[in-house]
Image (spheres, rainbow, N blue to C red):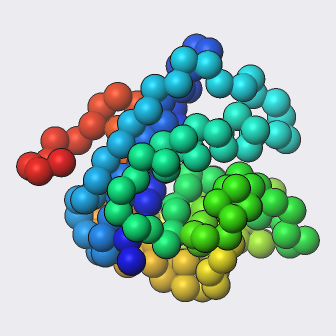
Amino acid sequence: MAFAVVDVDYTGPGATAACVVGDRWSDPAPIETHTLVLTEVAPYVAGRFFERELPCIVAVLSRVVTPIDTVVIDGYVVLDTEGTGGLGAHLHAALGGRCAVIGVAKTAFGDASFATPVLRGTSRRALYVTAAGIDVGVAAQRITAMHGPHRIPTLLGWVDRLAAGDPPAWPGC
């Protein structure tokens, strides 16, 4: 089954939520792309980031036509060894557990001992993978298998650019 990769870019009081849908983990291009401009979002509150980002992600995911079984976020699913829920855990709950959620963070949170480090390409800097609804080892394998020779998988870079208003050009998308 397909998977979605989501990201949100904030500008002033609003945001742009973006989503790309991949058919296979190794695919170089999405089969669907979506952006949603939100004129107002909740303010940032330290320790409550999910309250700002979650509504944006849920809204853009509602536009996906292809059945998906996994959502990849830019961030953490859990925040510590006790399993304190991050954005991904809140998303997993908001989706009623219907989709696994894989968190891919570019920077370590605390000592990041609760996350599985993934090295891609020739990078010596790890991505930190956490997950809900899927074994974190399987989640890490999927992120490792994603297309792209660099640290950041192609579709993660694609959705980041899409949210920032700089979509990559690709025939058919």
Residue 134 occupies quadrant = bottom right
**Does residue 106 appear anywhere in the picture?**
no
Task: Name the residue rendered at 30%, 31% in the picture.
Answer: 166
Task: Name the residue rendered at 35%, 63% in the picture.
Answer: 66
Q: Give the side of residue 99 with respect to residue 84, left or right.
A: left
Task: Name the residue rendered at 55%, 78% in the picture.
Answer: 139
Task: Name the residue rendered at 61%, 70% in the picture.
Answer: 98
Q: Give the side of residue 30 with respect to residue 73, left or right.
A: left
| Picture coordinates of residue 53, whole percent (x, y) | 65, 39
Count of residue discs: 0
| Picture coordinates of residue 61, whole percent (x, y) | 49, 50
* Image quadrant in which the N terminus is located: bottom left
In the image, is residue 160 above or below residue 124?
A: above
Residue 100 occupies quadrant = bottom right
| Picture coordinates of residue 5, whole percent (x, y) | 45, 56
Nearest the viewer among 38 and 114 is 38
**Does residue 110 appear anywhere in the picture?**
yes
Nearest the viewer among 105 and 45 is 45
In the image, is residue 159 above or below residue 102?
A: above
Q: Give the side of residue 78 with respect to residue 145, left or right.
A: right
In the image, is residue 32 above or below residue 9?
A: below
| Picture coordinates of residue 164, whole percent (x, y) | 40, 31
Nearest the viewer among 7 and 141 is 7
